[in-house]
C-alpha cells in the first residue's frame, strides 16, 4: 500500500467540501459519532439536509462563516492506498494557504462548475498548480447533474482547459465528469454518463502512477543532526542523520559535502538502526563516511554525478505570505530544508497576475498573496536545484527575523 | 514495482523521524511529552530510530494527573528504565496544592483541564522551547488544522488564525524567548496507521489495551472503570465486563469498549470493522461542546 497526497482547491460554491465529504462518506471513512455530530449541526441549518461540507470545516470561525480559511488535512484509505487530502480554501485572499497545501501534493483536483465552465478561479488554481509543480492534475467537472449530464458541455470545458494546460505546461491532466452532490462518478461509476469511458474519480486516485515522481538519480541528503554518542565503546561513532530527499546512496559511493566541497566515501549506512548496503528517497538514514571531515547541520551530502548548483544569487518566484509588504532591500533568513542563511531581497522584477499570468513590471512592492519574480542575494553559498527539476531542493522559505514568522515561499528558478 | 519503494508506513515513519531530528537540530531544550498511551509509546520508538546509538536529545516528560491507570504508570517507569532515558514527572496534585486550584466536582470529576496548569509550569521550570507530542490530525477537527510545528505564546496559547505557513519539508522553529513550539511528528497518522505500525514494529504496550476483566459502570452508553476517582451513586450497577481501552487517558474521562481482542491482530480487526471514532467512543471530555478541543488548545492544552 502506498501514499498519495492530494489537494482540493475550490470554494464551497464549487462543491469542494461536498466532494471531500462524499469521498470520505462513500469510502466509509466517516464514523457514526462523526455522522451524529454532523446531523446535529445540519439540523441548525435551514434546509435540514445533511451537509457533507460541515465535515471539513474545522474552526469555529469557519463554521460560522461557512467558509474554509486554513488548510485542513483529512485522511482516508482504501485497500490500495492511503490518502492525505490537503483541503485548501479557494478564494484569492487565501492564496498563501493554497500554496502551503500544494507544496507537498502529488496531485491536485481542480473543480470546475459545469454550468460556468472555466472561470477566473480555475485559471488561478491551474497557475498555482503549475508554479508549485504538482505532478498530476485532475480536472473534476462538477454539477453535471445540473446540465443534464451533457457530453457537449463536458467536451467544451475539456477543450478550454486543454488550452490553459498547454500554456502552463501542465503535464499529466485527466478530465472526469462528476456530480459530488449525487455521488455520480465519485466512488462508483455512474450510469448517467453513458458516453464517458474513463473510471470513477476514486478508481483513478487509486491507480494513478506516482512511483516515478520520486527522483532516484539526483542524490541529495540534507544533514539535520550529527549523532555522536561519545561513550567509551562508541568513541569514534559519528553519524550524519537526515532524510534523503532524492536519489540512492550505496556503501562505497563517493560523496561531496556542499557548500564546502569536501569529499569522502560512504563507509556505512544505517536505516532505523539497522545497517544497510543502500538507501533511497524518502528514507531517513544515518551515513558514516571514510574520512573525518567537517560536516554539520545545514550541509548537503550529494554524489559526484548530477551535482546541484551553488550560488549566492537566486532568481525566485516568490509567494508573499505576510500582511506587512515585502520591500526590496529587506533582509530575511532563507531556509531550505535544514540550511538557514541570511539573505536580502535585492529587487522585484515583476508581479505575476495569478488570474491571467500577465506580468506587471511597474510594481515594486509585494503584498499579502502576491506572487512576484525577485532576486535574492544570500550571505553564504547555497546548493540548490531549480524548483521545476527537484521540488524539495528548490523550494525555500523566508523568515522575518524580527517576528520569526514565515513570510514567503520561494520557488528557485 | 521498483526495488526503491517505500510503503505508506515506511513513508510515515521517515517523515516522523525527520520531524524529530528537526527538533533536535533547531531547539536548545526540547522535551517529549509522554503519557504512557500508545501514541507516545510510538513516539519513543520513533525516537530510538532517530537517535540511537546516541541518547535522546530530550527527556521524557509526564504530566501526571494522579488519575492514571496503574498499568500505564508501571509501563512508563519500566520503559524509561529499560531505555536508560531521563523521565521527568510533574504532578497535577502538587499544582493544585501550590496554586490553590479548585478540584472539579461531579461524578467523573476530571483533572484533564488542570493538566494545562502543570504543563505550563513544567515548561517554565525547565525552560523547554519545544515539546513533542503524539497528537494526530485525524483525532479531531481542530487538530486537523494544526501545524506540525505549532507555535504557542508564553501562555501556551494556540492562535489558529496566526499559524505559520508550513511548506515542503522545511520547518520554521524560530521563536521568541518565553514562547514554545508543540511538535507533532505523527500528525499524518490515523489510529489504524498507529496500530499497523505497532504490529509491524512489534512494539510493547500496557496491558489495558488488550481485553481484560474489569469492574465498570455503564453511563450514557459508555463503560467507565470503577475506581476511587469516580463517584458511585445508588443507581449505578457494577458490572463485570471483558473490555479493552482504545485510548489511555485518565480513569475519569476514558471509557472502555467491550472486546475479546487479546492480540494486536484482533485489535486491528476490530478497529477496521468499528463504526465509531476513537475519541467519540472513549473520550468523555470531548463531547461538551462542538469546539471543546479548539478551546482547550487555545488555552495551552497539549
Image (cartoon, coloured by chain):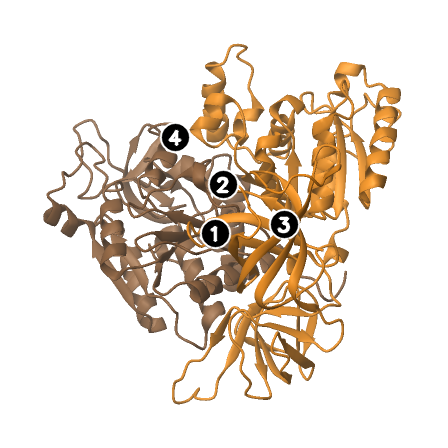
Chain colours: A orange, B brown
Which mark is in front, 1 or 3? 1
Q: Give the spatial CA distance, label 1 vs label 2.
A: 10 Å
Q: Earlier in the sequence, mark 1 or mark 3?
A: 3
**Helix or strand or loop: what does disc 1 sit on?**
loop
B21 with respect to B101 (left or right): right
Query: Marks 1 and 2: CB-CB under 8 Å?
Result: yes
Q: Give the spatial CA distance, label 4 vs label 3.
A: 29 Å
**Helix or strand or loop: what does disc 3 sit on?**
loop
Residue for point 42% across, 43% down? B259
Query: Marks 1 and 3: CB-CB under 8 Å?
Result: no
Query: Marks 2 and 4: CB-CB under 8 Å?
Result: no
Q: Chain of mark 3?
A: A
**Helix or strand or loop: what does disc 2 sit on?**
loop
Q: Which mark is residue A400?
A: 1
| In-front residue for pair A177/B205 | A177
B152 with respect to A378 (left or right): left
Q: Earlier in the sequence, mark 3 or mark 2?
A: 3
In this figure, which residue is indicated by the disc labeled 4?
B291
Residue for point 59% across, 38% down? A369
In this figure, which residue is indicated by the disc labeled 2?
A324
Badge 4 density bin: few <14, some 14–19, many ≥20, Cα 10 Å: some
Amino acid at each position: 500500500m502506498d501514499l498519495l497526497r492530494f489537494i482540493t482547491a475550490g470554494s464551497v460554491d464549487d462543491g469542494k467540501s461536498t466532494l471531500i465529504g462524499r469521498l470520505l462518506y462513500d469510502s466509509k471513512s466517516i464514523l457514526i459519532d462523526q455522522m451524529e455530530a454532523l446531523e446535529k449541526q445540519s439540523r441548525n441549518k435551514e434546509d435540514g439536509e445533511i451537509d457533507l461540507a460541515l465535515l471539513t470545516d474545522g474552526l469555529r470561525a469557519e463554521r460560522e462563516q461557512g467558509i474554509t480559511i486554513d488548510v485542513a488535512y483529512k485522511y482516508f484509505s482504501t485497500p490500495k492506498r492511503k490518502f492525505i487530502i490537503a483541503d485548501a480554501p479557494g478564494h484569492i485572499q487565501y492564496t498563501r494557504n493554497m500554496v502551503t497545501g500544494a507544496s507537498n501534493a502529488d496531485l491536485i483536483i481542480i473543480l470546475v462548475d459545469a454550468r460556468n465552465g472555466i472561470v477566473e478561479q480555475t485559471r488561478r488554481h491551474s497557475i498555482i498548480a503549475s508554479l508549485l509543480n504538482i505532478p498530476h492534475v485532475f480536472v473534476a467537472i462538477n454539477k453535471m447533474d445540473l446540465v443534464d449530464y451533457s457530453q457537449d458541455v463536458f467536451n467544451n470545458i475539456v477543450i478550454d482547459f486543454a488550452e490553459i494546460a498547454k500554456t502552463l505546461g501542465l503535464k499529466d491532466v485527466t478530465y472526469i465528469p462528476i456530480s459530488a452532490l449525487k455521488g455520480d462518478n465519485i466512488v462508483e461509476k455512474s450510469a448517467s454518463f453513458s458516453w464517458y469511458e474513463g473510471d470513477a474519480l476514486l478508481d483513478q486516485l487509486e491507480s494513478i502512477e506516482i512511483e516515478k515522481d520520486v527522483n532516484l538519480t539526483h542524490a541529495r541528503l540534507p544533514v539535520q543532526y550529527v549523532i555522536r554518542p561519545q561513550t567509551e565503546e562508541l568513541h569514534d561513532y559519528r553519524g550524519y542523520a537526515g532524510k534523503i530527499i532524492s536519489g540512492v546512496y550505496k556503501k562505497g559511493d563517493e560523496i561531496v559535502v556542499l557548500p564546502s566541497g569536501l569529499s569522502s566515501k560512504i563507509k556505512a549506512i544505517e536505516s532505523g538502526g539497522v545497517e544497510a548496503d543502500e538507501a533511497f528517497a524518502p528514507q531517513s538514514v544515518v551515513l558514516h563516511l571514510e574520512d573525518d571531515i567537517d560536516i554539520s547541520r545545514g550541509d548537503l551530502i550529494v554524489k559526484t554525478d548530477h551535482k546541484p548548483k551553488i550560488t549566492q544569487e537566486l532568481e525566485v518566484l516568490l509567494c508573499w505570505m505576510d500582511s506587512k509588504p515585502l520591500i526590496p532591500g529587506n533582509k530575511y533568513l532563507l531556509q531550505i530544508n535544514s540550511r538557514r542563511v541570511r539573505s536580502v531581497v535585492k529587487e522585484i522584477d515583476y508581479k505575476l497576475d495569478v488570474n491571467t499570468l500577465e506580468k506587471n513590471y511597474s510594481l515594486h512592492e509585494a503584498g499579502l498573496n502576491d506572487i512576484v519574480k525577485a532576486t535574492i542575494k544570500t550571505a553564504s553559498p547555497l546548493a540548490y536545484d531549480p524548483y521545476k527539476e527537484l521540488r524539495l531542493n528548490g523550494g525555500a522559505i523566508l523568515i522575518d527575523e524580527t517576528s520569526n514568522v514565515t513570510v514567503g515561499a520561494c520557488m528557485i528558478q | 514495482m521498483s526495488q526503491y519503494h517505500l510503503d505508506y508506513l515506511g513513508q510515515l515513519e521517515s517523515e516522523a523521524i525527520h520531524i524529530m531530528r528537526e527538533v533536535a537540530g533547531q531547539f536548545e531544550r526540547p522535551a517529549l511529552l509522554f503519557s504512557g498511551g500508545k501514541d507516545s509509546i510510538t513516539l519513543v520508538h520513533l525516537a530510538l530510530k532517530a537517535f540511537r546509538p546516541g541518547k535522546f536529545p530530550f527527556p521524557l516528560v509526564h504530566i501526571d494527573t494522579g488519575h492514571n491507570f496503574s498499568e500505564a504508570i508501571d509501563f512508563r517507569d519500566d520503559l524509561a528504565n529499560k531505555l536508560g532515558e531521563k523521565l521527568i514527572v510533574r504532578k497535577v496534585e502538587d499544582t493544585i496544592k501550590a496554586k490553590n486550584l479548585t478540584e472539579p466536582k461531579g461524578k467523573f470529576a476530571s483533572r484533564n483541564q488542570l493538566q494545562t496548569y502543570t504543563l505550563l509550569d513544567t515548561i517554565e521550570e525547565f525552560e523547554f522551547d519545544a515539546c513533542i507530542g503524539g497528537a494526530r490530525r485525524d483525532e479531531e477537527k481542530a487538530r486537523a488544522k494544526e501545524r506540525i510545528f505549532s507555535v504557542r505564546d508564553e501562555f501556551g496559547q494556540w492562535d489558529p488564525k496566526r499559524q505559520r505557513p508550513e511548506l515542503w519539508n522545511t520547518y520554521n522553529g524560530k521563536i521568541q524567548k518565553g514562547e514554545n513550539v508543540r511538535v507533532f511528528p505523527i500528525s499524518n497518522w490515523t489510529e489504524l496507521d498507529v496500530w499497523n505500525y505497532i504490529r509491524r514494529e512489534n512494539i510493547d504496550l500496557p496491558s489495558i489495551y488488550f481485553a481484560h476483566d474489569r469492574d465498570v459502570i455503564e453511563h450514557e452508553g459508555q463503560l467507565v472503570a470503577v475506581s476511587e476517582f469516580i463517584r458511585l451513586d445508588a443507581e449505578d450497577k457494577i458490572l463485570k465486563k471483558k473490555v479493552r481501552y482504545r485510548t489511555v487517558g485518565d480513569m475519569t474521562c476514558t471509557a472502555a469498549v467491550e472486546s475479546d481482542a487479546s492480540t494486536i491482530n484482533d485489535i486491528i480487526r476490530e478497529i477496521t470493522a468499528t463504526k465509531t471514532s476513537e475519541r467519540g467512543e472513549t473520550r468523555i471530555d470531548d463531547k461538551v461542546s462542538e469546539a471543546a478541543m479548539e478551546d482547550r488548545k487555545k488555552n495551552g492544552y497539549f
